[in-house]
Image (cartoon, helix red, strand yellow):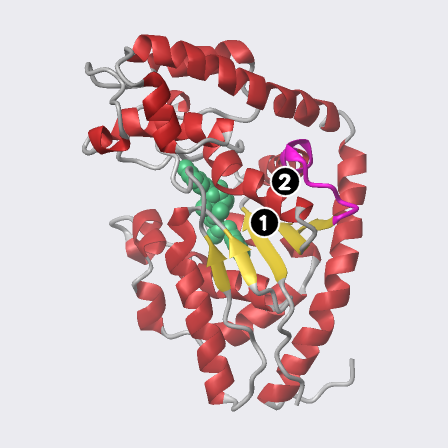
Amino acid sequence: MVACRRSKRVFSGIQPTGNLTLGNYLGALKRFVEIQDSGVETIYCLVDLHAITTWQNPAELSDATREAAAGFMASGIDPARSILFNQSQVPAHSELAWIFNCVARMGWLGRMTQFKDKAGKNRENASVGLFAYPALMAADILVYHATHVPVGDDQKQHLELTRDIAIKFNNDFEVDFFPVIEPIIEGTATRVMSLRDGTKKMSKSDPSDMSRINLTDDSNKIAAKIRKAKTDSAPVPESPDGLVGRHEAANLLHIFAALSDQSIETITSEFGGRMFSEFKAVLTELAVDRIGPVTAELNRLMKDPAEIDRILASGAEQATLIAEPIVRQTHDIVGMIGSR
Ligand code: AMP
Ligand code: TRP
């Protein structure tokens, strides 16, 4: 029997729904680029099959997929060094997901907080895909025998489920085939919060555009959103201890720390005692300085959608070369006959 690979391979995904936000950038994209630049093998995926677990307008889905691909490249993902593609172009994801649907238990999936949040009160009306979402996510990762998965804090529970699926499959079939993955949830911005409510995650799907900074926002918009961001009346504290219970203040300081690659301690000691109106002005300057070039490059790439489509097709071809043999071996382990 083929044994589990042990060398490091990184996989992560982002849903192509709506605009990429500063949360996606700091919690995910910026980290993806650092990992790519460290020389590790990296595979990054625009998970369009996950996107349709809630209704997506077809034309908007195509645009959002291209825009997300452009956002990856504008942030520094280089398709010559990372595999970049959209999920539906590699059928191996869906094939392995079916097998994992038969490994995962209803109870495990029913405990997922993202399902509970997204399904809301009317669970009977949620799509079956929304419920099975984490089994597809496990398939995304394990179909490459990836070992490490960088994500924001909100995906932690899904990655624990991925580990449980790998362990159960290996136990049920008495193999050492799927790796038990390691989440990478690191940095000062694993959970960027809404600019309007510091207890809620900054999200593409928030009805208020003022709650988030989009990678497509120009400098005027960024400035207006930071100026209007909610804070309390106290000044910036002298140390991180002074941030307890001050969600909005903590969020702005964490955003500054992440954008400037500094620790939160450095930021509180630098700005401690100053008023937030003053701090916001410096934060705006930094955000425009860091996000501006990404936005400009994203807009430039979006002028040639055919080139983006070619890059995604080429990424899908490379991804298929890795994923196909792993699905074939999985079928063999399960006892399915086939000659491909
Ligand atoms: P999604 O937009 O839900 O597909 O998320 C894509 C990636 O961005 C995942 O790794 C998320 O954990 C990360 N992410 C999304 N929103 C945030 C946020 N507000 N703060 C930090 N990371 C985030
Ligand atoms: N569920 C993730 C999110 O919403 C996106 C995702 C899908 C993903 N498949 C993945 C992330 C595999 C990491 C690895 O953010």
In percent of the image, x 21 and y 18: which residue is there? 232
Eyeballing the image, is 267 above or below 96? above
Bin the neighbour count of mark 2 within 10 Å (Cα to Cα): few under 14, some 14-19, many 20 and up: many
Closer to the camera in the image, 52 or 107: 107
Region in magenta: 71-81
- CB within 8 Å, label 2 to label 1: yes
Eyeballing the image, is 269 above or below 21? above
Q: How many marks?
A: 2
In percent of the image, x 46 and y 14: which residue is there? 284
Q: Which residue is mark 2?
A: 65
Residue type at mark 1 is Asp
- Whether residue 110 is in magenta: the answer is no
Q: Is residue 62 in view from this perspective?
A: yes
Q: Quadrant of the N terminus?
A: bottom right
Q: Position of residue 323 (x, y in %)?
A: 69, 67
Residue 212 relative to residue 92: left or right? left
First in sequence: mark 2 vs mark 1? 1
Specify the quadrant of the image occupied by residue 330: bottom right
Q: Which residue is mark 1?
A: 48
In the image, is the residue at mark 1 within 8 Å of ligand 2 by its beta carbon? Answer: no
Q: Position of residue 83 (x, y in %)?
A: 72, 52
Q: Find the distance from the CA under tag 2 to the CA under tag 1.
A: 7 Å
Residue type at mark 2 is Thr
Residue 304 relative to residue 219: left or right? right
In percent of the image, x 33 and y 29: which residue is there? 251
Q: Position of residue 109 (x, y in %)?
A: 36, 66
Q: Is residue 227 in view from this perspective?
A: no
Specify the quadrant of the image occupied by residue 310: top right
Bin the neighbour count of mark 1 within 10 Å (Cα to Cα): few under 14, some 14-19, many 20 and up: many
